[in-house]
Image (cartoon, rainbow, N blue to C red):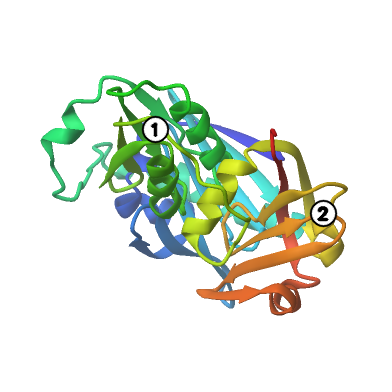
Amino acid sequence: MESEVLNIDFDPSTLLDLERSYKLLSLENVKRLEWGYEGTVKILKNIEFTCFIKKQDNSLKILEPYGKFKITFKINNNKIEINYDGISSLKNILINKIIILIEKYGKYFSKSVKRELKNNINIFKDEAEVLEDIRGLSCPLAEISLLKILENMKTGEKIEVLSDCVASTKIFPIIAKELGFISQAFNMGDYVSFIFLKIKDPKLPDFKVCLKNYKRIALSILKYNKIEKIEEYSKFSQELLYYDKDNITVASPEGRGWFLISYGNEKLKEIRLEYEGLTFFNDAAISVIDGLKGKFRVYRLVSLN
């Protein structure tokens, strides 16, 4: 990962007000998603990429969904650190353009940061005294972190968990329910705030691993809940899914242009792929992304039993 550091004479938190400052980052057509943003990075007249943008307290990430590049902006006092990870041929023209825009026009943007929260207020949310922030963790790290947070809590205890993981609203409530919790989710604009209240001790069901829907995926992660190995690749092939023991394999670029989860060992038993809004299984899943290029990580989840 290559980095550049800018010393500036204006409040760098201006960049975090994405709906006002997006042009400084060479972004166009920015729109808010359920949380996070989508926008277009335009490099040349005929070269542009649709990207996902994630914000945290003092940082911002621009993610090309299929792993072509990732740009991270870290803000510290009057400095902006820009980190680039991706295709080297895009680096100079993209980063140099952003640096010029920030240095030339940044001071003209208001340093005030507007925040818009959806009207979703509930007394239930205000009662949690313990807070865990797992923003920045994607699947399956977010789910495994949630398990560790919830598994040692006692009946009657309540906790607030912050997450910007795309799948969290689908997976977290299922995991919580199986562990004896009731939960409520609040859309905070750039992330989701979950309140979990433990109401009983869990009695986990006996089940077979199945990846056909999010409920079964959540149950499967309850069983295969140890990350044994993390690998990084730049080209997908079916051979990457093979492992020397029973495991759940999760593979995805950080921008989540595609998301694959499989179950098996040296023989694959089930494969599920989410790609451009569609879901594919087994051989069809492999045929869609076989040979696809772009940086992505592979997580090997094994059972503790």
Under circle 1, the secondary element is loop
Total marks placed: 2
Residue at 46%, 45% (x, y): give it: 102
Q: Quadrant of residue 23?
A: bottom left
On-image quarter of the N terminus: top right
User: Which disc is residue 265 wearing?
Assistant: 2
Q: Is residue 208 visible?
A: yes
Task: Choose between 8 and 168: the one closer to the eye.
Answer: 168
Instruction: Give the left or right position of residue 258, taking residue 196 as reference.
Output: right
Q: Earlier in the sequence, mark 2 or mark 1?
A: 1
User: Which disc is residue 57 wearing?
Assistant: 1
Vertical position of residue 137 compared to residue 210: above or below = above
Instruction: Give the left or right position of residue 296, taking residue 267 as reference.
Output: left
Vertical position of residue 158 compared to residue 68: above or below = above
Give percent across and percent down for residue 119. Answer: 13, 49
Contact flag, marks 2 and 1 (Cβ < 8 Å): no
Give percent across and percent down for residue 208. Answer: 62, 56
Within-10-Å neighbours for mark 1: few <14, some 14–19, many 20+:
few
Under circle 2, the secondary element is loop
Vertical position of residue 208 compared to residue 9: above or below = below
Residue at 20%, 47% (x, y): give it: 116
Q: Quadrant of residue 153?
A: top left
Task: Choose between 154 and 256: the one closer to the eye.
Answer: 154
Spatial CA distance of label 2 from label 1 is 40 Å
Instruction: Give the left or right position of residue 65, taking residue 120 as reference.
Output: right
